[in-house]
Image (tube, coloured by chain):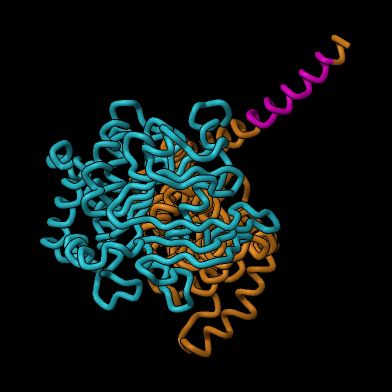
Chain colours: A orange, B cyan
Amino acid sequence: MKISEKIIEGGLFSSAVITILTTIGIIWVLLSQSLVFFKDVSIWEFLTSTEWTPLFTKKSYGILPLISGTMLTTLIAVAIALPLGLCIAIYLSEYAPRKFRDIFKPMLEVLAAVPTVVYGFFALTVVTPFLKNIFPEIDTFNALSAGLVMGVMIIPMVSSLSEDALFAVPKSLREASYGMGATRLQTSFKVLVPAASSGIIVSVILAFARAIGETMIVAIAAGQMPNLTANPLAAVETITAYIVQVSLGDVAHGSIEYRTIFAAGLTLFAMTFVLNNVSFFIRKKYQEKYD
Amino acid sequence: MSTLTMEKKTHFAEPIKNMSDSKKKPSIAKISTNNVNVFYGDNKVIKDVSIEIQEKSVTAFIGPSGCGKSTFLRLFNRMNDYIETFRKEGDICIDGKDIYGKKVMVEELRKMVGMVFQKPNPFPKSIYENVAFGLRIQGIKKRAVLDEAVEHSLRQAALWEEVKDQLNKSALALSGGQQQRVCIARALAVGPSVLLMDEPASALDPIATSKVEELIHQLKEKYTIVIVTHNMQQAGRVSDKTAFFYLGNLVEFDKTKKIFTNPKQELTERYITGRFG
């Protein structure tokens, strides 16, 4: 019995260690390969140059166009998901009958379970042609279409986590508000949303991080054109899409072109890492407030 | 008398007007209920209760836990409406008007019938914004009006002197007793004529409790106060009349002095003397 306990404990321990080692391994590969890259390309050029053309004859290694492509699609996605997600959260938490909420919420979360390749395909073959009717000048691959569809994809993250935050606001605050003669709408927007604001912010940040790291949709629908622009109708390239392009392309392993994807990956990792930590920090503060 | 279908905005100064009006017809009860039954689903929690509460008096509801005193109190500002299985029979009138009538706007009713809850529940906002909340949701934006109402209400709640230099501080940073008085000020700011208090001192320490009780004494001059309490000494100290509830029945309702010294019902006497409950 003692021995079997030991074996189980060892098994559980090693599964934890394997996870951590894998993470460390990933970070190690990212860092070491990036370090080699930054021996050839200065960090200054990497962060300030406005051209990203590592695969061309005239090479330039400015990550800004990729960051702008990433931010553009992500901001479009959040601009869709934040208002819609918040409205859904308020409706489910404050208006919908309990039974409806219990059925609707899991259904909404199915949106998050749709394979992203399906979303990407949908963006390219349905949304883009539709947008072309409205904006004839739009590129076949464009940030808007990818951003919109990505927005739909992250709605459940915003609505579900925000709904949890709204639902967790103490009943006593609702009573106080209703007791003052406030309507449901006033109670929702003047009491509950401010009281749940940290939870709502966390939901948006996590959705934001998810959109930044999203690959399939943008790789299929947003294009492969590193482009420092804020024009949503233009083709852009996100960091993730670039990494796919190079990984699947015929770039020689070990070449500087090949190493660009590690530098790009490191940049992406830094962005999502910061966002995750910000949300973790806010969530911790938020928990202290209500315990 | 302010009515349930007020055309004009409620104003914090209105109770004073109510006072002069009321002297003309002092005999009509402020709140009256007629054979009221309340159900939660199939569960009958208030059984055939009729009661008349006089204006500008303090009425205490006492009784053991689960006797229905809180539920009964929450009928007066329709807070039970949010319970999905809630159903009531019988009439409940304030100022002679059926507050469950079809034309009654529940938001308007609650501006007239303020409520203070068991646990202090200030909003996570500043002291100022807490007290101004009721006026803000009525669309009042003028700073001067809000300033005056906030000061007036905080003075009425005997809190002004303590917080006047820190009105922008979060209400959550105050002590429990101060928080409860912010909640009282918040309720008063919209100019109610009735104040419902659901065990307002049960979460407070003895000093804060005595301050709230003192406040109830002062507020009685302007407001009709109904207070639910599990503390019989408190009922004895603050109220003019006391209603004893047991298992959803109104067992006895009389002058507080009478209830505590010479109750008619044996059940009341047994509860008062602490033999059950």
Residue sitting at the far right:
A1
Rendering coords of residue B50 (x, y %) = 50, 58
Q: Is residue A29 above or below residue B254?
A: above
Please report the residue visible at 57 percent of the width from the left and 36 percent of the height from the top. Answer: B267
Dominant secondary-structure state across the stretch colored magenta: helix
Q: Residue at x 50, y 45 (%)?
A: B252
Closer to us: A219 or B276 = B276
Residue at coordinates 28% horizontally, 26% vertically from top-left? Answer: B207
Quarter holding residue A22: top right
Q: Is residue B138 magenta?
A: no
Using residue B4 as the reference point, say whether residue B46 is left or right of it: right
- Against B93, residue A34 (above or below) is above
Q: Specify the segment rendered in magenta.
A: A5-21
| Residue A12 within the magenta-colored segment of the rendering | yes
Q: Residue at x 64, y 56 (%)?
A: B40
Asked which quadrant contains residue B224, the reply is bottom left
The one of A197 and A139 positioned closer to us in this rendering:
A197
Q: Is residue A268 visible?
A: no
> Where does residue A133 sit, x and y in percent of width and height?
52, 90
**Picture coordinates of residue B274, whole percent (x, y):** 52, 26
Residue B252 visible in the snapshot: yes
Vertical placement of residue B138 versus B55, above or below? below
Q: Where is the N terminus of chain A found, in terms of image quarters?
A: top right
**Which residue is more in the foreground, A73 or B245?**
B245
Relative to B40, is A288 on the left or the right? left
